[in-house]
Amino acid sequence: MRTYASPEFALLAVGFTMVVGIYVVAMLDHVVGGRVAARPLLWREIVAGPARSAALLIVQRRMTTERTDTPGWMLAPALFAALAATALALVPLGPDLVVADPETGFVVFSAAIAFVMIAVFLHGWSPNSALPLHGAYRYAAQALSFQIPFLLAMLATALPAESLSIVEIVAAQESAWNVVRQPLGLPIYLVVGLAVSFWGPLNLPDGADLAGGTSAEDSGIARLLWQAARAAMLVAIAAMGAAGFLGGWWGPWLSGIVWMLLKTVALLVLLIAAGHLLARVRIERFVVVAWVLLIPLALVNIFVSGAFLL
Amino acid sequence: MRQFLARIAAGAPVPVFAIAGAGAREQVQDLRLNPGVRLVDSPREANVLLVAGAMPESLAEPLQRIHDAMSHPRCTVVAASPEGRDLHAWLPDATAVALHEPIAGGLVDVHRGILRGDRPSEPALLPDVEPAPWRGVGPFGQGGTGMTGGTPYGRPMADLLDDRDGLRLDILPLTVGPFFPRFPSGLILQATLAGDVVVESAIEANPFTDLDFEMVTPSPTLGPFLRALSAPVPIAELELARARSHLRWLADALVSQGLHALGVRVLALAARVRPGDGEEVRKLERLLRGTQVFRWSLGGVGPIAAERLIAIAAGPVARASGIAEDARADDPAYRELGFTPVTQRAGDAAARWRQRLAEAEQALDLAGRAGPRQTEVRGQVEGPRGLLLAEGAPTGRLYELVPELLAGLEWGDAIATIVSLDLDLEEAALAAQLTAGVPVA
């Protein structure tokens, strides 16, 4: 039995992290997008913008389509947000600062990522509309392709720690971060991370060619929740990337928690910038790259890391 | 609480579903430059429907459908010249703003008004009935004309068809348009999809042909080319309009690749460029190469063999497939400037993107060197989309090619292919009416 926070504290901590994380994602997206668009940035808009847009969606009344799967449609964002929350709960901010640290933390995290497919499929299926359904099937193809490289890239980080606990995985990086020991791991993880949260070049289920894909029929608070859950998942991916590959709380001069936050924000900026600066990847090419390139590379990554440990 | 939220919400960019009719493409596109407005892809996301320019009557019902799909609180803004009376008959609650003044201010005001509750949210225009009754043809109300396939309950069902890999897969009929945000206004595509693949498709007739263009002011990027059909026009003006047209196309094309912010940047550049600014376009091309759009998004997508494009005079589309055909090469003034057409070889969507960038760069260089030279009047002119004649525009000639191009493509590639053709239904309809002696403004 390892560390677990009390349920009340866990809810509070994870909820707070999610809200702050989602807000930070929205602000970063505005800043990076503004820079790319060569548009002047106003502090007021950066800080208040996400709150205003959220308020607008709360005020907007939900519209529905003919013969929807209503429970499914409502459940999808909740499931997606719950999966992001599960993933976030496993990320340690410091050696003793973690909501849940099960021995099998890595497995729980991978399970949360695997279930995202269900949430996205449900979200596309429920409105009973062609473009969302199309997006849903696309994500199925995308998810089936990224699961294995994702698992393998993450698994390599468990080798030096000789444990599946995330806290142990971070603790084992005191002498050298995994990004140095396993240089292939982080790039694979980030590519797949974009695919999991379908962000930027890998936003295929909700892409522009489907006029919004699985969220094309969303309005009002349902749209807000879906976008928020997606942003929360991006935060979870960045935070787990910082923990698994960038040494988590390890770093000189500053306290562990500050290092962890800095690394998470750095990865978030990288992921969001990729969203504004890289063009859409064709689904066929992504599937081919995932099976033909990412899986072998992730295997090489594991073999090399294993060989160093022998 | 709701009022408090509405007050906060009033500061957010207005979510607008914008529909560009004839003569308003640029004004609608320029809304992207305004941070107070956000053009959205789905009417569900929008609070404001903007209909700008002139619309043919056949698009009245689709317009009303879009209106009714919007979420409450909702409102409509019509930006049309005074003769756009029809729009008010179709959208009776709409607020009118002037087309040739910045529209964004009007959109923000109207939106604040409905958020404050100063005006009620607009009711539906069409009766809220199901497209067909949920009762089939059987004695117990079940079934229709087939259980897989057919249209039981008046709703098309997935059917089975052999796909390219020899499997029997579900196929799904899908109609997209006339206001699909990635398509030019008025384009209606009827596609049959097997999974992600377009098995076959058809395009409906251009609805803008019903529109009377006598009262429509042509857009500023098209105007100089229409004038050049019957009068000499300074080459500098014509080439600047060409560069702007290509950059405006690129801005929309980038949005279709999910690169919204870059699209805004390019749109700002389109407004800013001056004759001789070729270097700006070269810089832009380097930036685009960095996005990998030519490689992993468009490389090898929607190739068109050169022999399919012979005698179509489809401008950049033809030249991207290696046909060095350009009406400018026959104009003595252009020959003096040492003009030779740029071409690509690949003929795919990436080549068409590159071709337009290269032509924008060339056009700005030509405009910079042209001095007072004017075009020769020959009843035809090389427009930004190809050879413009008094009896037809390139879009009309490319139109029939589209279904054949899309067959076997994945949906994303099909959209990228249509975008790369730069179809303009308004231009096609307008050119067809020129023979009838419509004066060109």
Image: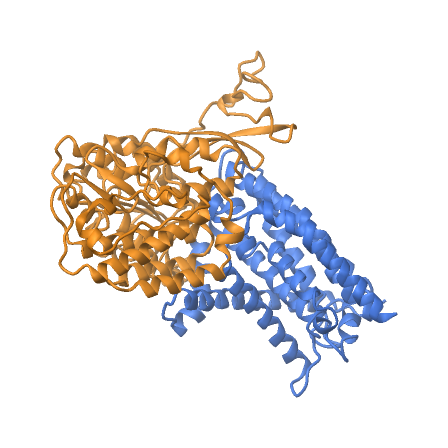
Chain colours: A blue, B orange
Indicate the position of residue A228 as horizontal and vertical percent values. Answer: 55, 58
Q: Residue at x 24, y 41 (%)?
A: B22
Residue B432 to residue A142: above or below: above
Horizontally, residue A8 falls left or right of residue B289, namely: right
Indicate the position of residue A52 as horizontal and vertical percent values. Answer: 42, 63
Q: Residue at x 19, y 35 (%)?
A: B390
Viewport quadrant of the C terminus of chain B: top left
Horizontally, residue A59 falls left or right of residue B335, namely: right
The answer to whether residue B81 shows anywhere in this view is: yes
Indicate the position of residue A2 as horizontal and vertical percent values. Answer: 83, 69
Q: Nearer the viewer, residue A263 or B166?
A: B166
The answer to whether residue B114 shows anywhere in this view is: no
* Labels in figure, total: 0
Q: Residue at x 18, y 49 (%)?
A: B332
Viewport quadrant of the N terminus of chain B: bottom left
Indicate the position of residue B198 as horizontal and vertical percent values. Answer: 52, 33
Q: Nearer the viewer, residue B206 or A213?
A: B206
